[in-house]
Amino acid sequence: MRLRDVDPSIIEEVRYATPHNFTGDPVPGYDEPMCVVTQPLAEALHAAQQQLAPRGYTLKVYDCYRPRRADERFVAWAEDVGDQRMKAEFYPGLDKSRLFADGYIAARSGHSRGSSVDLTLVRLPARPQRPYVPGEPLTSCTAPAAQRFPDNSVDMDTGYDCFDNLAHTDAPGVTGEAAANRNLLRDVLTSVGLKNYANEWWHYNLPHEPFPDQYFDFPVNSAAFR
């Protein structure tokens, strides 16, 4: 189901429908920048939003349901070690050949079952988010927040989809406000039944998902929900 049908107040910035992702191109299967999730996950995110809004925050989702064809594209991209267009932002300190071994790219993802989500926090009122311009200079996802691509979210000490140890949720180098922001996100999402993936501060799963053995491939577009 569409997340907006359960909670339209949650911000949606679906990166894979745009070229601002580690491949440098819109990803196959994302016909629209729309968040699709299973009903239990949508309800959990709504419950989290109800906790966050009175505290001056909103959730912002970067990725929700992901068609299988998108994962196939990620695998093909990872195997093409010559394509380094987005390295300076998304994996500046990692050899691309290590993406599989280090767990950043997988042939199958829980996102394709509709019960995984990538997300962050934004302070209210939310500032406008400027679009990425293909070809613009790239800055490391591990750089200080003021130097990274201007995301309207709170500082988590790395950008989204940062293939670096610093993106691990409990990375020892993350302290102060960024650590507090990661903990707030985790505390609220854990309280509504979601579980964090330790290598990515932004990634959460619904443990008791309704489709544990299925990987869907329908495209992300409104036609499927009319």
Image: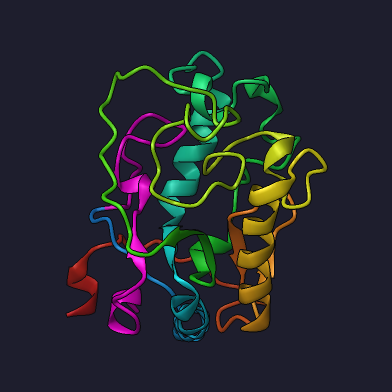
Write down the region rendered in magenta.
1-30
* Residue shown at 23% from the left, 56% from the top: 32
* Residue shown at 35% from the left, 75% from the top: 3
- Counting from the top left corner in percent of width and height, residue 189 is at 61, 74
Task: Using residue 30 as the reference point, say whether residue 80 is left or right of it.
Answer: right
- Outermost residue on the top side: it is 82
> As rendered, which of 222 and 33 lies closer to the eye?
33
The C terminus appears in which quarter of the rendering? Answer: bottom left
Magenta span main SS:
loop
Q: Does the magenta stretch include residue 59?
A: no
Q: Is residue 215 above or below residue 207?
A: above
Task: Using residue 149 as the reference point, say whether residue 2 is left or right of it.
Answer: left
Q: Is residue 197 above or below residue 59?
A: above
Which of the 4 quarters of the picture holds residue 67? bottom left
Residue 200 at least partly seen: no
- Counting from the top left corner in percent of width and height, residue 218 is at 34, 64
- Counting from the top left corner in percent of width and height, residue 184 is at 64, 66
